[in-house]
Amino acid sequence: MKRVVGRILLYAAVLIAAALVAMPMYWLVVSALKPSSEIFTATPRWLPGRIEWRNFVNAWEGAAFGRYFINSVGVTAAILFLQLVTSSLAAFALARRRFVGRGFILFAVIGALIIPIQVTFLANFITLQHFGWLDSYGALIAPFAASAFGTFLLRQAFLAVPDAIEDAARLDRCTGLAFLWHFLLPLARPTVVAFVLVALVAHWNDYFWPLIVTNRDQIRTLPIGLAMFVSQEVTTDWNLLMAATLFVAGPVLIVFFLTQRYFIRSHVNAGLKR
Amino acid sequence: MRFGRVLVAAAIAAIAGWTIPANADPVALSFWYPVDVGGGLTKIVDGLMADFNKTHPGIKVTAVYTGNYDVTLQKIQAGKLAGTLPDVGVTEISSVPVLASLGAAQPLDTLIAGSGGAKFLDKFWPSMLLNSRYQGKVYGIPFQRSTPVLYYNKDAFKEVGLDPNKPPETWAEMASDAEKLTKRDGGRVTRWGVELPLEAFNWFYYALVYQNGGQSLSADGTHVLWDQPKDIGALQYWYDLVNKYKVTPAYTPWNDGPPEFVAGRTAMIWHSTGSQSFMRQHVKFHWGMGRLPKNVQFGPPSGGANMMLYDTDPAKQKAAWTLITWLSAPAQAARWSAASGYLATSMAAWNEPEMQALVKKHPDVLVTKEQLKDAKAEPASPKYAPARDILNGLIKAVLANKEPLVAGAKKATAEANAAMAQ
Amino acid sequence: MTAVAAGASTRARARLAPYLYVLPALLLLGLWNYYPLVYLIHLSLHRLGASAPMPRWVGLTNYRELFANPLFWRVLGNTAIYTGLVVPLSIGLGLALALALDQRLRGARLLRTLLYTPVVLPTVAGATVALWIFNTDYGLANYLLGLIGLPPIGWLTDSEYALGSLIAVGVWKTFGYFMLVYLAALQSLPQSVLEAARLDGARPWDRFWSVTWPLLRPTTWFAIVIALILSFQAFDFVNIMTQGGPSNATNLLVFYVYQNGFQYFRLGFAGAIAVVMFVLVYTLSGLISLWYSR
């Protein structure tokens, strides 16, 4: 009996948490579908009385979302590729090789984790200017070519690979980069996926940096389209704003739902070993 | 061998490139602007620039949307450090001293002299030039300008027995009309008498101070005067609307204002002329526009953004100046104003067909023009930005009864003066 | 070439290889993360910006002004409250839900996905939705309060509630991550130890504290470090939702740096704030690591 009560309470608690999480997302979608007349009502409506698909058309026309979408995909893909290369190389050395200065380098990598962009961006802006890269894809990509977080996560995953595997690989003359490519990365695939998704969200989402370093509309990314709707002097059209928010959030959410089963398994290695 | 040939070809191309006379290439200009684009204003700017490029074959302008007022200002400040300034930038009017003292914006006096000198400037509404100068030199040319007006619900006026064609003209009338217009259901207000929404630039505080005959910033721009009797009086009136008459909410965020008015949650509201198009689209009752009220005088504050020039190279300066003068000419000013809801910057612009058509359709628009003769400057000085935020905090705290008015104003004044001295 | 020499060169290459592997990452992190830090320290000893178009050496003046500024202490207090609540709340909630979902609930997979969604939702999107929900007049939050007969609250406009609202959003956005991290850790705990404890007849609560919690310590260390880093996301929330207001009630260190550096263009002063913020975060991370390796 006590067990049953406990179980019911458990369900109730989890469902309340789920409702709290789901509500804002439901509200995002519903608001994007409402006509303006239903946005500003004293009692909000749970369902749109009339579905206003034009919100999406109007929001889409408010900024060059098509172009932004392509740019977002390209920039994010380039960042992820570079981060994977630089992080897996560094993580490989840090996890599986002994060398003088390793501890210090590891410390430096972890230390870089806690340097937020609000601190770095002025200096980086000036650096990019010296390179002549401002207002180019380079400015959107280069500062994120290495990832302290990725290096750290992959190192954790590579550490977990038993030495016996490396010894066996060595007998097959599979050493160095070949070992990294044929053994470590496949074995750490869940962590790689977890990292890719975290990085994908972070860079897909970034809007402050792109707004500062870009001037040409042709190279701007999706969140700038959203920034265009956050107005200064004229009233916010919440339904359009929510529709634009969906343009930005939609692709990430779709990727997440498609990969989630894989993704969730991937946390097993994160942070278990030091 | 082949490599050598390529090298020679490249060298020839390079030399040829050098020897092509420079005037064959159009001068490339960048134009940064911060308008809100929910209403599709980027398209209007793009259209203007396309026409400019068509009619000026020697110049090619690229217009760049640079985010809101604050982000645009930040981009230009950072651009000054990195050496990446635009040729022409549109920024909020109080940024004139900020960008001029930094050496980013360039003085325009020589260029103005070449375009007719005082005659050129006299075309603009005098009040629109109040925020254009720094240390005696002209830096800013009016572009996307606005001023606050009173929007009022004529049906609500009729309902409570007020004359729907006579919006309040004085502080006293404003308070008494608002009392009549406020509707309560038990303890809860279902309709406010009047709302004074607050944004980061503290527009309505300045309005009240001017209406009360005061100044909020010393003439040399070095210290604020919020603890002076007229400033205290201004804040006291606002406090009374909120806490004595109870006809105004303590805080209405800027963007919430117009929807509140549309939904009938407030019978009157002070808001930007820039909100007219939103009102026209959404309001379902009879409404009108009036001047902001006076106490000892009328005193609507100026607002919006000016164009400034950032080139030091004479050839570029000349091209940029051509763009600035073209955009501020009556035909373009009228086109921009009619489409955007920003104010036409020159008197002549009101005679252009677009503006005539607008006046015919919405005669109320004349109120915005009439008000311009009383308009006052927006407080500005190179290091005013932190003071602006301190004032914003003071207003919110006092109106919400979290800080006593006089003591709070004294403390904020000291804090702001210290910040501006830093 | 003799065999000995060949062996030596292979060994030399093997010794060099790790350095080559870490080089790209290290150079890039050095350029984009550490150089800015050096630049900031340099800046913090100068006047640059609104009051000086060219850098001017001022020694420790910026630090003196910072420590004398009451707003700095207020911001520090806000940050302590924000971080001090968001970190344990998001980790705690994550752990609690992980323990619940670990009980093989029906629909656990669906719930897990749902609870994780805010983590992948872009911060900008999350902040924009939160802004709409917390709208005083038309927001969902006040409507729900009205349903249970409570008066509306100025979630983001009243200085008494605004920081709390930001904390709620911060927890909402991040707890799902810790839930998954703990869930993964729970599922990989040695079953034999847990079984032994169960056979001992220990009650679930005692079993958790005496067996599970100690075993989860590495995970908790990891979670705290990540939570601290994620708490920088507060910048996006503050920037979009409150701009540090009302009356600085939600001004946090990350925003304060930005506000002084880019809104007020006081670069030297902002540099000093950033350096102080840095020292604090490093000290905190050091303390956490000390606790972990205790």
Image (cartoon, coloured by chain):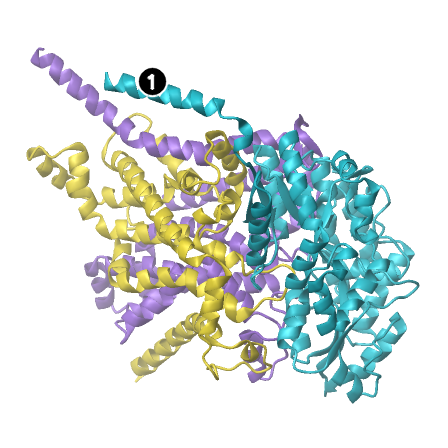
Please name the residue shown 59% across and 60% down the image.
A231
Q: Amino acid at mark 1?
A: Val
Quadrant location of the N terminus of chain C?
A: top left
Subunit ID for the residue under disc 1:
B
Residue B241: quadrant of the picture: bottom right
Chain letter for the purple colouring in the rendering: C
Residue at (27%, 63%) from the top-left corner? A258
Residue A186 seen: yes
Q: Position of residue C252 (x, y in %)?
A: 59, 51
Left or right of A81, for residue C122: right
Q: Which residue is mark 1?
A: B8
Closer to the camera, C3 or C204?
A: C3
| Closer-to-camera residue (A80/C117) | A80
Classify residue B193 by image quadrant.
bottom right
Vertical order, B158 against C175 (above or below): below
* Chain B color in figure: cyan
Name the colour assigned to chain A in the rendering: yellow
Local secondary structure at mark 1: helix
